[in-house]
Image: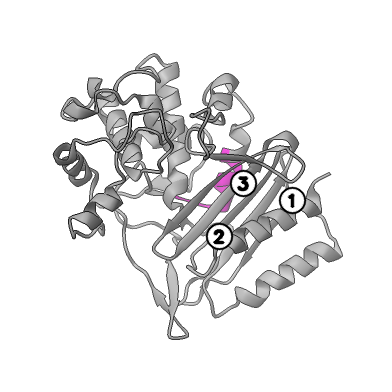
């Protein structure tokens, strides 16, 4: 079901002016109570071969991966494999000085464990092609918390690398295999996968681009860490993911609601399990998750009270946060009752 209005056409024309047949692209979907009301793609997935962005184009989701990692942990909790308040040293005993950190602290980004990007900067290292094992070794050497766990919000990719490692140690499966079996296949997300350097070909993938000197350059950089990133998906598969979050198909509705609950009562930043939390202009609950990596820019915004979602995936570094917010807000105003 698509709405046909002058306002929608105006928005589409605005997007077309930027994302052309000669530029990187963007894929946009709006979902209202299960119905797809806007589903449009513009620009190119690959500038070298003039391959257009389509609904089948696979994008690097970057940090949107975190909501999938969070769901994997909730699945393990419901299966009785671990608890939210279990100490991470039960599973990662090498992190001796992180004894006060729990699984919940990792999920709520309030562990006090420093973001490994800041660590490598401080050590004059490069984060390019760094692996989970290398991050873990850095954290073993670091062994210092920035603050008492649970007292502050601090966005740290290290938390999500550790969650992926906990998944692997508890299940005996690779993170990618666990996600495939327990989430992607169950939801019919047949075009979604975790990047694997042993099988690096991702069919129908978009390549990320940045602009410099009035030209576009391909930013071909593989992020090898997983848990904090690493998931590749299509707009159609993310529709299936969005709809599953209204059901008990993967986990109980109570635990889904917990995932959308702030982890620190007095914190300035409202954050659940891989989701930022807030409200729209009239006080209705809104949650969102963004991704940024090597030319890719994305966001999923869910207006929970009205069951309205906007998904934006782009392979252009020029797709700014302000632009993504503007498109999201305009679609919400067009289709929201």
Residue 130 x/y as whole percent? 23, 53
Which comes before the other along the chain, label 3 or label 2?
3
Residue found 38% across the figure and 18% down from its top: 85
Tell me if 91 is positioned left or right of 51 in this view.
Answer: left
- The reply to whether callout 2 and callout 1 are in contact (CB within 8 Å) is no
Disc assigned to residue 321: 2
Q: Quadrant of the C terminus?
A: top right
Real-space CA distance between mark 2 and mark 1, rounded to the nearest whole angstrom: 16 Å
Q: Which residue is mark 1?
A: 332
Answer with left or right where residue 41 lies relative to residue 73: right
Q: Who's the residue at 37% across and 69% down the image?
A: 219
**Above or below for 158 versus 1:** above
Residue 106 on the magenta segment: no
Mark 1 or mark 3: whose residue is earlier in sequence:
3
Per the model, the C-alpha gap separating discs 3 and 2 is 12 Å
Q: How far, Cα to Cα, is label 1 from label 3? A: 10 Å
**Residue sitting nearer the eye, 225 or 125:** 125
- Under circle 1, the secondary element is helix
Image location (x, y in percent) of residue 132: 24, 44
Q: Residues within 10 Å of mark 1 (few under 14, many from 20)?
A: many
Q: Which residues are magenta?
A: 232-241
Q: Nearer the viewer, mark 3 or mark 2?
A: 2
How would you rate the neighbour count of disc 2 (Cα within 10 Å): few for under 14, some for 14-19, many for 20 or more?
some
Position above or below: 47 against 162: below
In the image, what residue occupies the spot 59% across and 22% down? 253
**Residue 198 visible somewhere in the drawing:** no
Horizontal and vertical percent for residue 152? 42, 34
Residue that carries the numbered disc 3 in the rendered image: 301
């Amino acid at each position: 079901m698509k709405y046909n209005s002058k306002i929608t056409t105006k928005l589409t024309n605005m997007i077309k002016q930027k994302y052309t047949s000669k530029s990187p692209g963007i894929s946009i979907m709006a979902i209202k109570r299960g119905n797809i009301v806007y589903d449009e793609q513009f620009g190119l997935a690959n500038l070298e071969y003039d391959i257009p962005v389509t609904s089948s184009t696979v994008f690097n989701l970057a940090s949107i991966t975190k909501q999938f990692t969070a769901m994997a942990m909730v699945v393990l909790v419901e299966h009785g494999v671990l608890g939210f308040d279990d100490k991470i040293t039960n599973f990662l005993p090498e992190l001796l000085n992180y004894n006060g950190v729990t699984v919940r602290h990792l999920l709520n980004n309030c562990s006090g464990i420093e973001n490994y990007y800041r660590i490598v900067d401080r050590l004059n290292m490069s984060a390019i092609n760094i692996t989970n094992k290398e991050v873990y070794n850095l954290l073993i050497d670091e062994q210092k918390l920035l603050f008492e766990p649970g007292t502050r919000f601090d966005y740290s990719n290290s938390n999500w690398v550790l969650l992926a490692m906990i998944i692997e140690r508890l299940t005996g499966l690779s993170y990618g295999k666990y996600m495939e079996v327990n989430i992607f296949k169950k939801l019919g997300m047949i075009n979604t996968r975790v990047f694997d350097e042993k099988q690096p070909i991702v069919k129908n993938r978009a390549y990320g681009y940045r602009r410099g000197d009035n030209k576009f350059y391909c930013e071909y950089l593989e992020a090898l860490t997983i848990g904090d990133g690493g998931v590749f998906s299509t707009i159609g598969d993310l529709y299936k993911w969005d709809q599953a979050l209204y059901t008990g198909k993967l986990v109980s509705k109570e635990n889904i609601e917990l995932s959308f609950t702030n982890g620190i009562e007095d914190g300035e930043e409202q954050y659940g399990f891989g989701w930022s939390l807030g409200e729209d202009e009239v006080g209705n609950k809104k949650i969102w998750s963004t991704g940024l990596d090597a030319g890719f820019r994305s966001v999923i915004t869910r207006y929970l009270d009205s069951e309205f979602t906007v998904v934006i995936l782009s392979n252009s570094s020029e797709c700014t946060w302000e632009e993504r917010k503007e498109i999201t807000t305009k679609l919400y105003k067009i289709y929201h009752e």
